[in-house]
Image (cartoon, coloured by chain):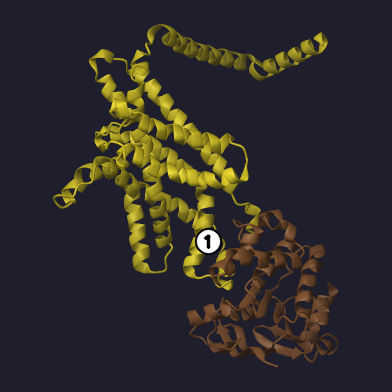
Chain colours: A brown, B yellow
Amino acid sequence: MKPVLIAKNLIKSYTKGSRALDNVSLELNQGRVLVVMGPSGSGKSTLIRTFNGLENFDKGELNVLGIKIDSTHDEQKIQRIRKRVGMVFQQFNLFPHLSILENITLAPIHVQKRRKIDAEEYGMYLLNQMGIDSHARKYPSQLSGGEQQRVAIARALALKPELLLFDEPTSALDPERINEVLDAMRRLAEQGMTMVVVTHEIGFAKEVSDQVLFMDSGKVIETSTPDIFFSNAKHERSRKFLNQLDKY
Amino acid sequence: MFNINSDSINTLFQKVRKLLFSNLFNTVLSLVILLIISLVFFNIYKWFSLNSSWEVVTTNLPLYAFGSFPTDQQWRPATWMICLLFISLLTLFGPKWKWLRKNLLLAWIITIPLGLYLLYGGFGLSPIMSRQWGGLTLTLLLTIFSALLSLPLGIILALCRQSSLPLIQKSSSIYIDVMRAIPLISVLFFGQLLIPLFLPVGIEIDRVWRAIFAFTLFLSAYIAEDLRGGLQSIPNTQIESANSLGLNQVQIIRFILVPQALRIALPSLTNQAIGLFQNTSLMAILGLVELLGVGRSILANPEFIGQYIEVYVWLASVYWMVCTIMAVLARHLEQRMTINKTNFQKL
C-alpha cells in the first residue's frame, strides 16, 4: 500500500506565539479515507489547507503524492501538487460569473490544456454522476446550497485528482441538503478515491472512514480506526468532544 | 358603464383634492407652482411657434453630422453612423436568436476598424485627412476610441495598484492620484500644445489622435479607481479556490478577477463613458470641429448671427439623444452581466 500523504512534525505558529499546528504527523495510504475531527479553532482547517499549499507552515515536512515540500513553500512544487489534488470548501466558492459547466471546465482547459470538447464531455459526465447535469447551463446563484456543493465536488474531480480534500463540506448546508452531498462523497470513497475530510458528521465518519484523527488546540490527540474512536476513545478530551456532539 | 366612469372620476377628483388642496397653505402652494409651470410652458411654446427660426439647423444638417468632410464622400461617415445605430437597435430590440446574440459582440468590434477605414480611406476609397473630420462623426470617434484605449490601460493600472511589488504599486497610485488632481482641460491642452514640442522633429501625431491620447491618459485613472473598487469587493475565497484548482497568477487575473471586477464596476464605467462623451465638447475650445465646434463655427457665419438659442437647443437635444442611447445600452448590458450578489456568501 503506497502512502499518498505523509506529514512529519508540522508546526505553524501565529505571531502571538500560540500554535495553529503543534507537531502534527500523519500518514494516509492510497484509497483510504481520513476524517479529521475537533472543536473549532483546533487547527483542523489549517492542517487540511497545508496539504495543497493554501497555508504555509514553519517547521516540518510534507510529502504529497511523492512531492516533498517544507517551510520554504516552493511555489513550483506547490503548483505541481495542486494539479493533482482537488479541494472542496465549506462555502463552495464557485465562480459566480461562470456557468456550472464553465466552472468545471475552466481548470481542465487552462491548467491541463485539454481540448474544450473533451473537457466539456468529461464535465457533463461528472455532473451526471453528481445528478445535476440538467443544471449545466445555469449559474451558481440559481442552484441550492447542496447542488452548489456537488458542483464544487465535480469541479475538484475534473482535474482527475489522486487526493481529494474536503474542508467542512456540509457545514454551510441546510440539514435536509446535507445527505445529498454526503451520498456523493460516499460513492467517491466506494470508487477508491483517497480523501481527507474535515467534518462533524459522525454517521459519515463511522460508515466511510478508515482512520479518524482528533485534534485540539493544534495537537493530534488521538488517531484510531472509527470503531475504536466512536465506541471506546482512548483520551478524555475525545470522549468529552463526542459527548458534546451527541447532544446536538 | 356610465356609473363606473363617474365613480372613477369622482375618486380621481378626490385624490387630486387630497393631494394638492388639502388645506389653505397647500392650495396656495399648488396654485403658485401650477402658475409657474404653465408660464414656462407658455413661453417656450410662444418662442417655438413665433420667434424661433430653425433654418440654422435644417440647412446645416450635413455640417452637424460630418463637419467639413468632402460632400461627395459624406456617405462614408453616414454609413458608419447608420451601422452603429442599427447595431444598437439590434442589440436592444432584436430577436433573441442564439447565433445573433453570439455574433453581436463581433459586430460591435468590427465597427471600429470599419469606422477607421471609412474615415481615412485608402484601399479603393480616396484618402481624407483627419483635419477634415468633424461634427457628430468626430465626437463619436473621440468617444469610442478614447473609451476603448482607456479601458485596458485602466485595468492595468488597477491591477498594478493592487500589486505586491512596491515600485509598481507606488508608481501606479502616484499616476492615478496626479491624473485625478488635474482638470481635464489642462490634460487636453497638454496633448494639443506640448506633445508636439516633446516629439522629435519629423514625427508628427495628428490632432485627433493627440486628443484621443489625452482623453485616454485622463480617463484611465478614473477607470482604474472604479475597477479597484470592484477588485476589492471580490472575496479572497475566490482566489483560494482558483489557487486550489492549479490556476496560476495570470490565469486568476484573467479568468476570475478582471471579469468579476468589470461586472461589479459596470454601472460606474457607464457613467464614465457618458461623461467622456460630453467632455469631448471641450475639444471645441482647442480647435477641433466636433459637434459643439460645428455649432460655434455656424454661429460665426454672418448669415446666422445671433441664433444662439436655436443652435444650442439643437445641440443639447443631439447630445441628449446619444447619451440616452448609451445609457439604455449600458442598462441592457448590466442586466445580462450582473452577478447575483447572494452568491458571494459571507467569508
> On the picture, is B338 further left or further right than A31?
left
> On the picture, is B294 further left or further right than B263?
left
Which chain's residue wears label 1?
B
The percent coordinates of residue A172 (x first, y second) are 72, 65
The percent coordinates of residue B288 (x first, y second) are 27, 34
Residue at mark 1: B255
Residue at figure coordinates x 60%, y 16% from the top left: B25
Residue B83 at least partly seen: yes
Looking at the image, residue A81 lies above or below residue B5:
below
Looking at the image, residue B250 lies above or below residue A54:
above
Pick the residue in front: B143 or B71: B71
Residue at figure coordinates x 40%, y 47% from the top left: B148
> On the picture, is B168 further left or further right than A190?
left
Pick the residue in front: B280 or A167: B280
> Residue extending furthest front?
B124
**Amino acid type of the residue tagged 1 in the rendering:** Phe
> On the picture, is A170 further left or further right than B36?
right
Looking at the image, residue A135 lies above or below residue B164:
above
Residue at figure coordinates x 18%, y 51% from the top left: B199
Question: Is label 1 in a helix, a strand or a loop?
Answer: helix
Q: Split into 4 quadrants, where in the image is the N terminus of chain B?
A: top right
The percent coordinates of residue B209 (x first, y second) are 28, 44
Q: Total label count?
A: 1
* Other residues around mark 1 within 10 Å, as few (<14) / some (14–19) / many (≥20): some
Pick the residue in front: A203 or A28: A28
Residue at figure coordinates x 44%, y 38% from the top left: B274
> Residue extending furthest top?
B50
Q: Split into 4 quadrants, where in the image is the C terminus of chain B?
A: bottom right
Q: Quadrant of residue B122?
A: top left
